[in-house]
Image (spheres, rainbow, N blue to C red):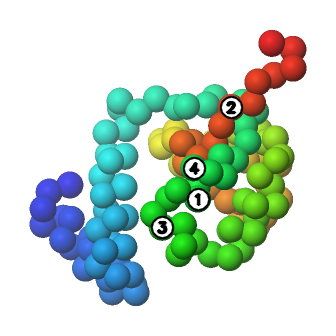
Amino acid sequence: MNREQKLAAIRRLQAKGHTKEQAKSMIAQLTSFADKKNMTPDFAEGDKVMIDLESIKRDADYPRFTDKYKDWIHAHADDVFTVEFDERHRDLPVVVSLQEDTSDPKWLFWTGNLKAVESADA
């Protein structure tokens, strides 16, 4: 994404109600995902994981997360989940959903906010 494209994207996000700082942050995150060819998934579909609550709470945007999301991650912080690739994000293997999540729609997670669970038979 070149400079003009970034500025246009920032303006579009601002028109939707985001602050300039939020828009710049979103664009920075998206451009960091731009090189998908070099992106390797942290987890395979079917891997067992837990939510890394401390990692999520360290996020600079944590205070702006919705209460519904915060309540959900706190309620499920000790649960074990199964990774599944969301159909809309198959080209972005670092964004996954959790098979046991019954929310509608399901929450999406960056794999950096999940931690692997050692299997009992390993």
Which amino acid type is marked by label 4? Answer: Ser
Q: CA distance from mark 2 to mark 4?
A: 13 Å
Of callouts 2 and 3, which one flags the residue occurring earlier in the amino acid sequence?
3
Which part of the image, by quadrant, shows the N terminus? Answer: bottom left
Of callouts 1 and 2, which one flags the residue occurring earlier in the amino acid sequence?
1
Q: Residue at x 29, y 79 (%)?
A: 20
Which amino acid type is marked by label 1? Answer: Lys
Q: Which residue is mark 1?
A: 57
Q: Residue at x 39, y 81 (%)?
A: 18
x then y, percent, for residue 109: 60, 51
Which amino acid type is marked by label 3? Answer: Asp
Residue 46 seen from this side:
no
Q: How many marks?
A: 4
* Label 1 packing within 10 angstroms: few (<14), some (14-19), many (20+): some
x then y, percent, for residue 49: 72, 37
Q: Which residue is mark 4?
A: 55
- Disc 2 is placed on an element classified as strand
Q: Which residue is mark 2?
A: 116
Disc marking residue 111: none
- The answer to whether 111 is drawn above or below residue 18 in the figure is above
Q: Which residue is mark 3?
A: 61
